[in-house]
Amino acid sequence: MHSAGASALQAESHHRQHLETHWYGPEHAVCVRLQTGGECGIFGEDCDAMALDTAALDGLPGAWLIRGMRYTAAKLSCGHTFHVSMLALHFLSSDMRCPLCRAGPASEMYLHCVPRSARRDVRTRLRLLEDRARHAEDRRIMSQLSATSSRGIEADLRLMVTIHHRGLDNTCLAHVLSGCVYVPGLRDLDEHDSSLDAPGGFCFHLTLQRNFVRHVLSRMRHMQHEVGQCTVQFSLEHPLFEVAVSTRRFSPSVAATYPLVSAAHAGLASITIGQVAFDTEAQSITAAINQHCVRALLLETAARE
């Protein structure tokens, strides 16, 4: 009896050291055997030892506590074993294939497969991994752009002027003029340039063609003489702008500086990205855009290419 009881306790202890479970994705599930100990196929270290290495885990839970049991390793049906949190992070951020033999489904795992006791730490580590990936991609794009001439951006950049007025039959009419925009101050953007993170003012003053400025002012004077009054609206346009960037409509008789504002969309607030200074008496139109706008434009250009 004593021998039979000891064998039963030993069998129960052996059973409690392992837990067969399934980790799920959108279409498939992977059978995983959670256990205590075992060599991690990626790091070549015992998973119990890795559970104590906070630097290597970088915020991940060293062990998963489930029903009073502590599990540090996860063994896949292909026979490869990994630290449980490391494998879960791989399944969440990449796919559910074995990191060594690539057996398994090519889809990401659901976060709810991680037990509640470990879920917050795993979610935090996953977000940190995503942030690092985005930062690395931004750095890669900016390095590619470091030798890019500003002419590539300026080629499709236009300042549009819309003159609104009423016809003789009181119908609303609009006359549109378009001018090229040059940015003589546009320089190669350095990822280490602290000014990129500053909320400062407008650092890129746009150069407008003199003929364009004269044409706009002349057309405004003509409209005012013919119809008595009109309103003006400036817009900065580029194929990469997904929303309108424009000033409000204003009377050309008032000399002032008007902000260029992006239209709000998809729950995002409008953003001031530039300004247009208008003065009919001084016969001048000047414009400027914030360097953040240029940087976003460059990144978007590279991303689409």
Image: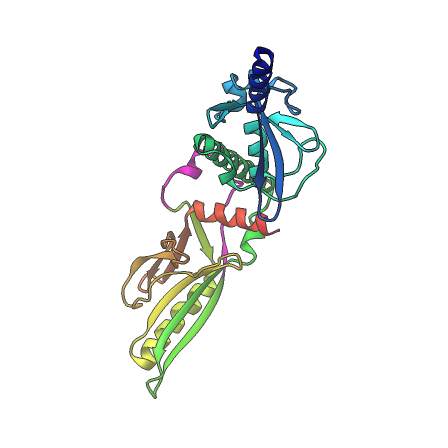
| Point 54% across, 54% down: residue | 154
Instruction: Choose between 113 and 86: the one closer to the eye.
Output: 113
From this view, report whether residue 22 is shown above or below residue 45: below
| Point 30% across, 66% down: residue | 250
Q: How many marks?
A: 0
| Point 57% across, 11% down: residue | 2
- Horizontal side of 287 relative to 84 (left or right) equals left
Residue 169 occupies quadrant? bottom left
- Does the magenta portion include 197? yes
From this view, report whether residue 17 is shown above or below residue 136: above
Q: How is the image coloured?
A: rainbow
- Does the magenta portion include 51? no
- Horizontal side of 274 relative to 61 (left or right) equals left
Give the main secondary structure, helix, strand or loop, of the magenta stretch: loop
- Horizontal side of 163 relative to 241 (left or right) equals left
Q: Where is residue 114 drawn, in percent x and y?
A: 50, 35
Q: Where is residue 134 drawn, in percent x and y?
A: 53, 39
The residue sitting at the right extreme is 101
Instruction: Choose between 147 and 2: the one closer to the eye.
Output: 2
Q: Where is residue 25 drawn, in percent x and y?
A: 58, 44
Which quarter of the figure is the N terminus placed in?
top right
Q: Which residues are magenta?
A: 180-201
Can the viewer see residue 70?
Answer: yes
Instruction: Choose between 131 and 5: the one closer to the eye.
Output: 5
Q: Where is residue 83 drawn, in percent x and y?
A: 58, 25
From this view, report whether residue 120 is shown above or below residue 294: above
From this view, report whether residue 155 is shown above or below residue 294: below
The residue sitting at the left extreme is 254
Can the viewer see residue 151?
Answer: no
